Amino acid sequence: MTFADVEAAMERLDDPTVVKQTPVERSTSLEAMTGAESVHLKLEHLQWTGSFKTRGAYNKIRTCLEAGDVSQVVAASAGNHAQGVALAASRLGVEATIVMPTVAPQTKIDATRGYGATVELVGDDFRQATQYAMEAAEGTDAEFVHAFDDPAIVAGQGTLGVEMARDQPGVDTVIVPIGGGGLISGIATALEELSPSTRVVGVQATGAATVADSLAKGSPQTLESVDTIADGIATGGVSELTLSIIEERVDELVTVTNGQIASAILLLMERAKQLVEGAGAASVAAMLGDDLDVEGESVMPLLCGGNVDMTMLRAVLIHALTQRDQLLQLRVHIDDRPGKMAEISGVIADHGANIQNVRHERALDDLDVGEAHLIFQVETSGAEHAANIIDSIADHGYPVDVVNRLT
């Protein structure tokens, strides 16, 4: 897979109703937090389907049409590739069947069907869905469109690298999330030609990280199961194609935890006014971590996906708010007598905090007869506000603990 393949893909992606050039936005907040000279967010999550995946899918299907008569395609995906294939197939007049894991977010299932594809829910993860889809395509006229293990897919994703080089000529570092490796392989190929001095950094979720191990062992390694809130990069493995390109053209690898990804999602909402999914926030999470130094550099983190599952978003926000002490669960030890709840509630109210709910706990081994715990869930403005509330409760003579503080 060479830059010439990327150039050919650029020519094929000539329909702006399928793939558009996405904007870049500077973030002074991230510059201040990281010490970078400049941070330019590549907003690929604003693509028509909410992710970069249409680039590769359209290039693949159109390449197949140029080579012969293709009337049907089959693909497997947790969501973003599914939508990319569905939209590309619809625009090119080809029927599409997409196999998605049973745990795929409903929003992504609905969106894929909305683009005209037939959706089948099979398996517990991406690998099981892929195996079923490949077997279903065997012996038929349908073309299987792999999510990353295909030169045409990689070349299509490489068109994003061309855009990034044009958006910010001479950028010092680009940061790209890695699932199966198709995206970073394409981008690294484009940048090797157009901006060879640019450092290409790949980011994996710790619960789905396979690239470092694969490079160390010299062949693609897979995980039996993945554990990450970033379902867009939860492939659990790379291919020989993508691994070889990563080894040759990617400069550095880092991993990020679920907690770091959650914090990055919230930060992007607050500071950049951008709502992205876990995979899309991984690049910013890497910037804010300890393993990547971008001080004094011009940096372009790629926000590659914005198809947020609302249930996951709620969990992410709760986690991030808890981490910031903006959502507290306080356990207050009391003598179980009338008026105690009202008194402590008044202390919390005096600080302008909102009590979401409160409950009594009496049947516990560490409580004597006539004693109880009050468990308050409280919204605060942050760590200082929370500390003032806790101190005031203690000053009123009540032992108090934070029972949901993350370590």
Image (cartoon, rainbow, N blue to C red):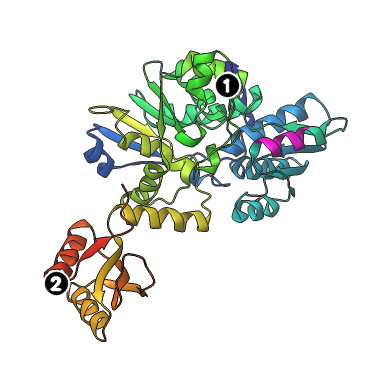
Given residues 245 and 26, the one toward you in this image is 245
Mark 2 or mark 1, earlier in chain: 1
Q: Residue at x 62, y 49 (%)?
A: 104
Please tell me in which quadrant of the rendered image residue 179 appears: top right
Neighbourhood count class around disc 2 (C-alpha, 10 Å): few under 14, some 14–19, many 20 upward: few
Kindly check if marks 2 and 1 are in contact, taking CB atoms under 8 A apart as contact: no
Q: Which residues are magenta?
A: 127-134
Question: Mark 1: which amino acid?
Answer: Thr
Element at label 2: loop
Q: Residue at x 46, y 55 (%)?
A: 313
Q: Nearer the viewer, mark 2 or mark 1?
A: 2
Is 256 left, or right, of 389 in this rendering? right
Question: Looking at the picture, how far across and down is residue 262, in whole percent?
Answer: 40, 47
Give the alpha-carbon distance from disc 2 to disc 1, as whole Å.
62 Å
Question: Looking at the picture, how far across and down is residue 65, in whole percent?
Answer: 77, 30
Q: Residue at x 19, y 64 (%)?
A: 390
Is 226 left, or right, of 132 in this rendering? left
Q: Is residue 43 in view from this perspective?
A: no
Is 375 left, or right, of 248 in this rendering? left
Given residues 391 and 123, the one toward you in this image is 391
Neighbourhood count class around disc 1 (C-alpha, 10 Å): few under 14, some 14–19, many 20 upward: many
Question: Looking at the picture, how far across and down is residue 404, in whole percent?
Answer: 33, 57
Question: Mark 2: which amino acid?
Answer: Gly
Q: Is residue 375 above or below residue 220?
A: below
Q: Which residue is mark 2?
A: 397
Q: Residue at x 61, y 19 (%)?
A: 241
Counting the numbered discs, the total is: 2
Is 117 left, or right, of 350 in this rendering? right
Q: Is residue 301 a member of the stretch shown in magenta? A: no
Q: Which residue is mark 1?
A: 242
Element at label 1: helix
Q: Is residue 351 above or below residue 296?
A: below
